[in-house]
Image: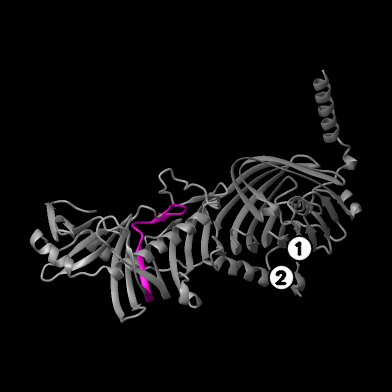
Amino acid sequence: MILRLPGMGHPTCRFGTGPWCLMPFALGVLGAAGCVAYDVPEQPDLSALVDAYEHPSAEVDVQTAWRALEESRLDEEVGLAVLGLDLAAGVDRVMEQLDPLIGDPHGEDGSDRTVKVGGVRVEGSGSVHIEETCERVGERAAQPGAVDMILSIRESAVESVASGRFRGCWTRAAVITDGDQAPLEGPWIRLDGDFAVDLGGTLAIGERIEERWLTFRFDGRAQLEQGDAVDGELDFRIGPGWLAVRLEIPGAGHAVKALRVDGSALLLQGASTLLECSRESKSCTGSDGASFW
Amino acid sequence: MHGIRRRVLLVSAMASFMAAPAGAEAWHSEEERLLDDTAYALRAREGRIGLWRVGAGLTDRLSVETSPALWIAGAALGAVVPNMAMTTVLYDDGTWTASVRAGVVHVGRPGQDLSASVFLMPVTAALSHRFNAQWSIHGRMTAVAAAGAATVQGDDLPFDGELVASMLHADTTVEMRVHRAWAFTLTLRYMPWHGPVAMASDVTTPDGSSASVRLNLAVRDLDHAYQVLTAVHGSFERFNFRLGVGVGDFFLGGGALVVPWRFVVVDAGMFVRFGAPSERRGAEP
């Protein structure tokens, strides 16, 4: 076709129909490419839960502490803690796999928003979806279940909260023992439900969880292999060799119970007191103003 | 001694080259103009052969070309890089010229352990204005879209990924013709926007665990990428060359690929132009 354009000092302007057909196609491809970007999943807010662990509300004393500890159960909590450690190891494995691709963070203190990929500064955002098969043991091997976890990435760092879901995931509870013995293996528990975990701050690409405290919240069903199912919400905290759970003290608020997973130490953290307790003597001794964290 | 003689020979050769008889020179008039970084294109029955581009004019307003350098570089890296671009002149009244150039580059690397396939699609809109026989100005806007996929087969870390990326950059060239066959250009290139590289990959570990990664990677070293380049162009009856030096980033393949550099850049190219010689020889500026 031929179009006449005014004011350009030339009588005609020829438009070949063939080449023009390329334009909408090319512009469409360019526009589509410009629009492609992945969402960063929103994660639950666990700041209140983390604050509850770090600032217990209940005042505890040596007279009432042991009674409160006796009324708490640890088996299921420790079982979840073991699974939590597995999840942390899964995150570390992902970070390990990214190591060959990504070099050191650009900033010397790791605070820069970029990482270096092949010597080029890159800022990343998006998500990592990890799916792990739960332990395959005995009769459960045919249906081992799985755990999904989603990490959100902004400014080249993993956000401090990750979330996921247990889908028929079997884990084995452990029973805390006295002294230096390793935890005894307890009953099997099947987990179905959502969880969220606070990683104790953002995690730079390539960084490991290792020595951090992780705060978990589980909302779902825990089904004992030979026993009842428990529905509800549960939270706990795990750190290097430690498990911590909140302990409600009627009329006083909550304290935090912390124990070494090998059973060698049992602590009770109150609002202003840290008590060290002994299962043998069934008593606690305290020091005012001290904090476990 | 040998060094001095060699330098004298080199200077003599360059002097002879620059003082080539006028009859052997081609005018860069409104009939035959700089082809790189401008809106101009090969005319009907014209062709060019060079390392960077080999092309032919199908009609006065439509030309096609390919880049041998990409074929060669791809072969050196074990990849096949077929590429083609088409330029259509939309408007040309001798003073104003507008054109659009659309290309496609495919980087294919077949293999057992690593296979990759990436498409690049640069589209350029260009406008040139010739003030007089001595001064011209050229402006271009280029958008590039890229999409690709790669697969790594390995015992340790099988990988399957895809990526999409896009960018936009502009350049302006001021052309000053100082001689019948010689011209200087000053080119400013700038990238005002580049989209993130949207990358999706799936990794499976030997124990059966898997990770699906969805990342937007913004290449921060490409933020405000630029280039300031001065170049000298020589055009003779058939032989053409350009030699430039500047600072900034590398804009390769007509801007299809921008490499962060921020240092001294050099630009060089030569090609032979043929076809429709009678029209070129007789032209006046």
Dominant SS type (magenta): strand
Q: Residue at x 62, y 49 (%)?
A: B259
Q: Could you say where residue A238 lies in the image, as x and y percent from the top left?
A: 31, 60
Q: Is residue B171 left or right of residue A289?
A: right
In-front residue for pair B209/B53: B209
Highlighted range, magenta: A189-208
Across and down, in percent, residue B170 comes to 61, 55
Could you tell me which residue is drawn at 72 percent across and 57 percent down?
B39
Residue nearest the observer in this picture, B130 or A240: A240
Q: Is A176 in the magenta?
A: no
Q: Label 1, on which residue?
A: B86
Disc 1 crowd, CA 10 A, few/some/many (<14, 14-19, 20+): many
* Visual colour scheme: one colour
Residue B104, quarter of the rendered image: bottom right
Q: Which residue is mark 2?
A: A22
Are the two marked residues, 2 and 1, in contact with CB atoms closer than 8 angstroms?
yes
Q: Is residue A193 magenta?
A: yes
Q: Chain of mark 1?
A: B
- Real-space CA distance between mark 2 and mark 1, rounded to the nearest whole angstrom: 10 Å
Amino acid marked by disc 1: Met
Q: Amino acid at mark 2?
A: Leu
| Residue found at the far top of this picture | B1
